[in-house]
Image (cartoon, grey):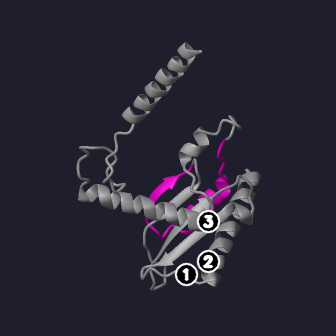
Amino acid sequence: MRLQRLANTVLMAGLLVSLAACGGLSSGDSGLFKRKGASIPTEGQLSQKERADAQRAALARAKGEDQEKSTLWDLFGNKDKPSTTVEVNKYIWNASLDVLNFLPIESVDPFTGVIVTGYGTPPGGGRAYRATIYVQDPALDARSLRISMQTKGGGAVSPETLRAVEDAILTRARQLRVQDTKL
């Protein structure tokens, strides 16, 4: 009985020491520096982080979700469904690029269905817009398309403008599908 108690005490002490050794973070970390002795980030790294945060926020607004944050890595960590894939409707994807061709493209990811554009003015228009398009489903359906737009001044566009852009993209997607079936 005494030997078992001694073994448990030694085991607990060993676990506590190994847990303490895993720490590595100083108590004064602000979250920007991950480990002791980390170098100070450059101006370029900070602006890149700000752009990435802005893209994530725009994507969350486009998806209409205020739920838990999820990342691309969550897809790989899903052990419940090992066959989970991300599918994008090619007609909505191509229609989005056709309709919003006046906007300069900053980043595209056809595997997740995200298109992020820079500011551009439509033909015959005077106001500059920027858009984030999220194609979230393989169906040719209005539910598959999420768009977030803003003006150069930082304000959101009117719901009528947003609906007109969505309608134009969906109409062009249907036209592309009809063309594809004729071939």
What secondary structure is marked by label 3?
loop
Q: Which residues are magenta?
A: 85-110
Residue in the image at 70% along x and 37% along y: 80
Residue in the image at 39% along x and 35% along y: 20
Q: Amino acid at mark 3?
A: Asp
Instruction: Using the image as rendered, state which of residue 123 and residue 145 is in the foreground.
Output: 145
Residue in the image at 65% along x and 78% along y: 164
Instruction: Using the image as rendered, state which of residue 49 and residue 101 is in the foreground.
Output: 49
Q: Is residue 176 left or right of residue 149?
A: right
What secondary structure is marked by label 2?
helix
The numbered mark at residue 66 is 3
| Residue at the disc numbered 1 | 157
| Residue at the disc numbered 2 | 162
Q: Can you tell which of label 3 and label 1 is closer to the viewer?
A: 3
Image quadrant where one finds the N terminus: top right
Residue in the image at 37% along x and 33% along y: 21
Alpha-carbon distance for marks 3 and 1?
A: 20 Å
Given contact means CB atoms under 8 Å apart, are the residues at marks 1 and 2 in contact?
A: yes
Q: Is residue 98 visible?
A: no
Q: Position of residue 114 (x, y in %)?
A: 55, 57
